Image: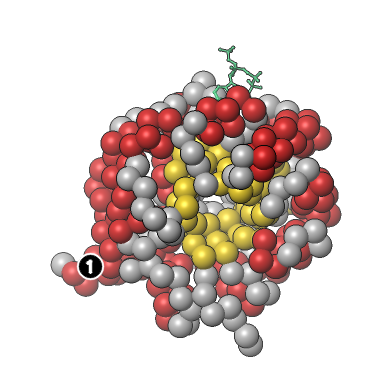
Amino acid sequence: MTLPPKVKLVDVGPRDGLQNEKQPVPAAVKVELVQRLQIAGLKEIEVTSFVSPKWVPQMADAAAVMAGILRKPGVRYSVLTPNMKGFEAAVLSKPDEIVVFGAASELFSQRNINCSIAESIERFAPVVAAARGAGIYVRGAISCAMYCPYEGEIASERVEMVARLMKGIGVQHMGVADTIGMATPLKTQRAMEAALKHYDLNDVSGHFHDTYGQALANTLISLQMGIWQFDASVAGLGGCPYAKGATGNVATEDVVYMLRGMDIDTGVDLDKLVDAGKFISDYLERKPNSRAATALLNKRA
Ligand code: HMG
Ligand code: MG
């Protein structure tokens, strides 16, 4: 079995994690979280979303958060942009990467971004063109690539279709998302294979929510396919406001613990990452939603 020697982790905690919090989280706390993540060695951080504040009030401070972060050389900062309005606001804050987020499920597309899959591609096309024209890297995300909270199981052909459409408008990277964390490894493999029909192995990543405890297994089967890029969320924060009942992404601490044990390099210092997770969990007055972090914090105590 050959596995990738290194893995690129994108910590999506400040965005995917905090977008789902009921109580407002001040911009200063988000900025501090980003700071602690980069101190822990994260080289890719998904900071925020330039979305409608009526839809996702938690992300209303996107510009303030981007203005507040202390950029560290070698670290890349990404933001979500669903349309030109979001892109035009985002570009002022100089992201390294933007994310256009579509779905393999029609109903989820409607609920999340208020348009059909076909309309979303039309909306993304000028965003992608403008970003690439400005030298900003464009990542795409396909939500509900395996299961949808409204449509149930999603056929891998739908993932292939959205990957093809995104490729057609110039999206450079494809993130395959198990939005509600229901997928098991073979289902994940089929969704990844569908994206790989249109994207190179080096341009596909996994974004696994951990609702059913399957995310590490889904990460492992993706690694076995040669996929080496994954999103994860410090302290397992998160969920999507339009996917009720879905919990956070796989905890970055759990992924780093697994990869470290497999001699796969992530560049992340697990102890400092646990500190970052504890910082935000303390702020939110809860325990980190990470088995590895819990074990390591118990050991410290
Ligand atoms: P809409 O209502 O159809 O938009 O929303 P519209 O173009 O008709 O405009 C309506 C109003 O929104 C106008 O304001 C616009 O200016 C404003 P008004 O004239 O009424 O005062 N507006 C905006 N304001 C700020 N920023 C913008 C923006 N666009 C329009 N970018 C829209 C369409 C896409 C904007 C809306 O549906 C939206 O913001 N959705 C975001 C949903 C979201 O953020 N979901 C969570 C992130 S996705 C996710 O978590 C999944 C992921 O993690 C992968 C996975 O796990 O699956 C990525
Ligand atoms: Mg997500």
Using the image as rendered, state which of residue 251 and residue 205 is in the foreground. Answer: 205
Q: Amino acid at mark 1?
A: Asn
In terms of image quadrants, where is residue 86? top right
Write the residue at 67% across / 35% down: 130
Query: Which quadrant: the C terminus?
Result: bottom left
Q: Secondary structure at mark 1?
A: helix
Residue 267 as seen in the image, left or right of residue 294: right
Write the residue at 43% across / 55% down: 75
Using the image as rendered, state which of residue 61 and residue 239 is in the foreground. Answer: 61
Write the residue at 78% across / 50% down: 167
Residue 156 as seen in the image, left or right of residue 208: right
Question: Where residue 26 appears, x then y in whole percent?
Answer: 31, 32
Residue 95 as seen in the image, left or right of residue 223: left
In terms of image quadrants, where is residue 39? bottom left
Question: Where residue 158 appears, x then y in whole percent?
Answer: 81, 50
Q: Residue furthest front?
A: 134
Residue annotated with mark 1: 298
Write the residue at 45% across / 70% down: 266
Question: Where residue 269 appears, x then y in whole percent?
Answer: 33, 69
Query: Which quadrant: the N terminus?
Result: bottom right
